[in-house]
Amino acid sequence: MDNFQKQAITIALREMFEGSHFSICAVDKCLKIAGVIPSAADYDALSALHCVHWSKMPADFRNQVFVKTLELFTHAGFPLERILEAAAGKRLRALN
C-alpha cells in the first residue's frame, strides 16, 4: 500500500467518524484498498449499523464501534495512529 492509498483510507475513515453516522460503505472501500478480508462476526455486526447516527448509539457502544472498525485494519500494516489522532477526539468526545 503506497502513501496515496494510506492517506485515502485515513481521510475516508476520519470523515466517517467525524460525520453524523456510521457507513459500512466507507469501511468496505477502505478494506478493499488495504486488501483486507475482515472476520465475519465483527464485520456483520458493523454492517448492521450502516447509516445509524452516532447520536443514537450509547457512548460506550459508539466507542466499541470505533475500536472494532479500526481492529479490521490492524493486520494490514496500516498506521492506525493517523486515524486515532484525527477521529478519537472530535467524534467520541463531542457525543458523550
Image (cartoon, helix red, strand yellow):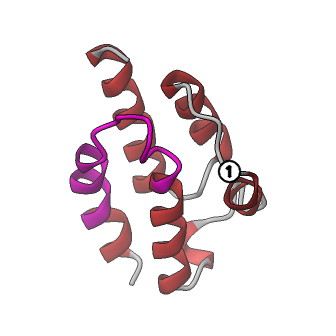
The quadrant in which residue 8 appears is top left
> Is residue 58 toward the left or the right of residue 71 in the image?
right
Q: Label 1: how many residues lie within 10 Å, few (<14), some (14-19) or many (20+)?
A: few
Q: Amino acid at mark 1?
A: Ser
**Residue 68 visible:** yes
At horizontal 62% and vertical 77% (from top left) the residue drawn is 56
* Between 34 and 87, the one nearer to me in the picture: 34
Please tell me whether residue 94 is drawn above or below residue 29 in the rendered image: below
Q: Is residue 76 magenta?
A: yes
* Whether residue 19 is visible: no
Q: Residue furthest front?
A: 75
Q: Name the spot of residue 59 as percent of width and height, x first.
A: 48, 83
Residue positioned 28% across, 55% down in the render: 84
User: What secondary structure is found at the residue carrying circle 1?
Assistant: loop
Check the image and report above or below for 4 versus 84.
Answer: above
Q: Which residue is mark 1?
A: 39
* Total labels drawn: 1
- 51 is higher (above) or lower (below) than 13: below
Measured as percent of width and height from the top left, residue 36 is found at 57, 33
Quarter in which the N terminus is drawn: top left
Please state the extent of the stretch shown in magenta in the rendering. 71-89
Residue sitting at x 65%, y 36% = 37
Q: Quadrant of residue 46?
A: bottom right
Image side of residue 53 versus residue 16, left or right: right
Percent from the top left, x then y, of residue 55? Answer: 55, 75
The residue depicted at 75 percent of the width and 52 percent of the height is 40
Q: Is residue 93 magenta?
A: no
Horizontal relation, residue 64 to residue 9: left or right: right
Q: Quadrant of the C terminus?
A: bottom left
Residue 27 appears at what percent x and percent y? 58, 41
